[in-house]
Structures are given as structure tokens and as C-alpha cells.
Amino acid sequence: MKILIFGAGNLLLTDEGFGVHFINYLQDNYVFPEDVELYDGGTLGIMVTHMLEDADHVYLVDVIEAKGEPGDIYRYEKEDFMLGKLPIKMSPHQIGIQEVLTLSDMRDRCPQRVSLFGVIPSSYEAGVELSHLLAGKLPGLAELIIGELTAAGHIVMRINK
């Protein structure tokens, strides 16, 4: 089973880059087996449909606009996308994720599982660093996803620094 951890975002707008910072955090702190791929999707949106279609389970990490407080993390599954149940607006570069998944589904290429971890940003100011609040969310989200991978039989090793 191929797993894709896909981080989206714009690194030039502080918290908008959360998904990309998350991928960098994973690369800096863990070693993953060959069947788990980390991908910095940046702001490519629909241009990376092939990456999603080649995986069995996709973990999407991005910022979202939703009710709640900055730093709150919400989880949505494929069914939420496909049935239009997402009560959120994803960030601008992710316009069309429902359409991308619907198109993949019509082509019978949609991943079996898609999980979105969306975090409410604290800042969209110009800058290349995450806000202190969102930077503090990286380790917990990493442990959550790694816990799921481990439970599914994938061996993920922590890098000792």
C-alpha cells in the first residue's frame, strides 16, 4: 500500500506554508519506508493530481478557513470531500480539491483513503517562518500521523539529533 503525505502551502506567507513546513519537519526528524512518500505540493493544486492518484492513502496537510481558533486542527476524510460536506474553505491554492478527487473518482483512480488535516492559521503576513503557535503544532501532528502509519505496519524511525 502506497502512502502519500502531501503538504500544501505558500512558504512566503507565514502560516499559509504550514503543509510545506510540515513536510520539512518530517524530513528533518524521521526516516520513512519506501512505501511512504513525502511531497511538498507547494501551491501547485490541480497540477499534482497524478501524485494523489498513484497513492492508496493520502494524508493532506494544509491551512483551512473554518470556525474555531488559530491553531485548531480538524480532520476530514474522503467521504467528506466527495459528498461536499466540508464546512470549510480551504486555502486559495487548494481550490478544486473536491473537483480533483471527483475527477479521479470518475477515472477510477481516486485513492482508497484521503485524510485532510487542516489547521486554522494565525497569520498570513509576509514571511518565511511559521507563527510560534503553528510551529508548536508540528510535533503533535507528526506523532498522530506516524502513530497511524505504525499501527498499519509501516516502520518509521526517528532521527536522533
Image (spheres, rainbow, N blue to C red):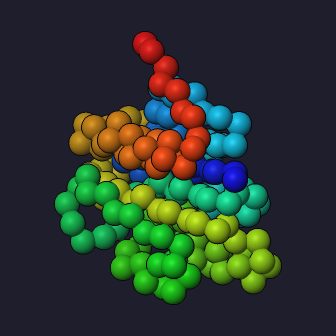
- Picture coordinates of residue 72, whole percent (x, y): 26, 57
> Taking the image as drawn, is residue 140 in sight?
yes
The C terminus lies in quadrant: top left
- Position of residue 27 relative to residue 60, above or below, is above
Of all residues, the one furthest to the right in this rendering is 107
> Taking the image as drawn, is residue 13 in sight?
no
Q: Please tell me which residue is depicted at 39% across the width and 60% down the height of the picture.
A: 118
Looking at this view, is 70 or 157 the one in front? 157
Of all residues, the one furthest to the bottom in this rendering is 83
The picture quadrant where one finds residue 100 is bottom right
- Picture coordinates of residue 107, whole percent (x, y): 80, 79
Q: Please tell me which residue is depicted at 52% across the width and 57% down the height of the picture.
A: 60
The picture quadrant where one finds residue 112 is bottom right
- Picture coordinates of residue 12, whole percent (x, y): 47, 43
Horizontally, residue 1 falls left or right of residue 21, namely right
Total marks placed: 0
Of all residues, the one furthest to the left in this rendering is 69
Looking at this view, is 35 or 134 the one in front? 35
Q: Please tell me which residue is depicted at 75% across the width and 83% down the height of the picture.
A: 106
- Position of residue 84 relative to residue 100, above or below, is below
Q: Please tell me which residue is depicted at 45% across the width and 15% down the height of the picture.
A: 160
Looking at this view, is 78 or 8 the one in front? 78
- Picture coordinates of residue 116, whole percent (x, y): 47, 62
